[in-house]
Amino acid sequence: MEDVDVSRQLKQMTDFIRQEAVEKAVEIEAAAAEEFQIEKLQLVEAEKKKIRQEFDRKEKQVGIKKKIDYSMQLNASRIKVLQAQDDLVTNMMESARKELLYISRDHQTYKKLLKILIVQSLLRLKEPAVLLRCRKEDLELVDSVLESARNEYAEKANVYPPEIVVDRHVYLPSAPSHYQAPGPSCSGGVVLASRDGKIVCENTLDARLQVVFRKKLPEIRQSLFGQVAA
């Protein structure tokens, strides 16, 4: 083979190898570019997903916060309404308590009431001997009805008239007054106890008001607010 033919064949082989290398390089570059694009899209999608998740999380947080704020405002409003209702009921109670003061000012009416209260207390205690306490200013009225109260109880209970000892050393507190410092007070009535002090019947006007008020409270709330409190 002549040198010219050899050189031509070598050139053809070199060109072929070069062409193969170029094509391979292009192929590798294209594959790398495609892989880069795929990876880039995956990264972009991952970031988008992360952003969407973060947005959803914050949106839920905002929604939860709005619900919490609304619930707190609603509870605060309910508390204000309940407080206003309680204040109104308390004011009614105070007004009723002030009205009790007028009862003892009518001596004839109050005298009859004292007798009724003493008889009621005796019927509750059913004791042969009792201790009675009253306000100091009511002592004379109590003494005046004591005997008739004993006899009325004895007749109703079908027993002997009980022994009633009026405590002349310890009295119930006086009626509330603007001139006195705040403290215990009593609008009238009596407290009876067994001689050993184990059984006590508090039959003061204030205690009776408390009992009636507690009993009638659902009706009062129904009348004032249109609902019965639990």
Image (tube, grey):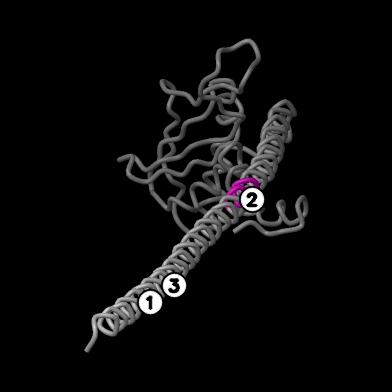
User: What amino acid is found at the position of numbered circle 1 in the picture?
Assistant: Gln
Task: Say few, some or many: other residues with alpha carbon within 10 Å of mark 1 (under 14 / 14 to 19 / 20 or more).
Answer: few
Residue 220, position as x, y percentages in the image:
72, 51
Instruction: Give residue 94's quadrant in the image.
Output: top right
SS class of the residue under badge 2? helix
Q: Is residue 131 above or below residue 30?
A: above
For the N terminus, give its image quadrant.
Answer: bottom left
Q: Who comes first in sequence, dot 2 or dot 1?
A: 1
Please report the bounds of the magenta region as a residue range.
68-74
Residue 65, position as x, y percentages in the image:
57, 50
Real-space Cα distance between discs 2 and 1? 75 Å
Task: Say few, some or many: other residues with alpha carbon within 10 Å of mark 3 (under 14 / 14 to 19 / 20 or more).
Answer: few
Q: Residue furthest front?
A: 2
Identify the residue under disc 1: 19
Task: Say few, some or many: other residues with alpha carbon within 10 Å of mark 2 (under 14 / 14 to 19 / 20 or more).
Answer: few
Identify the residue under disc 3: 30
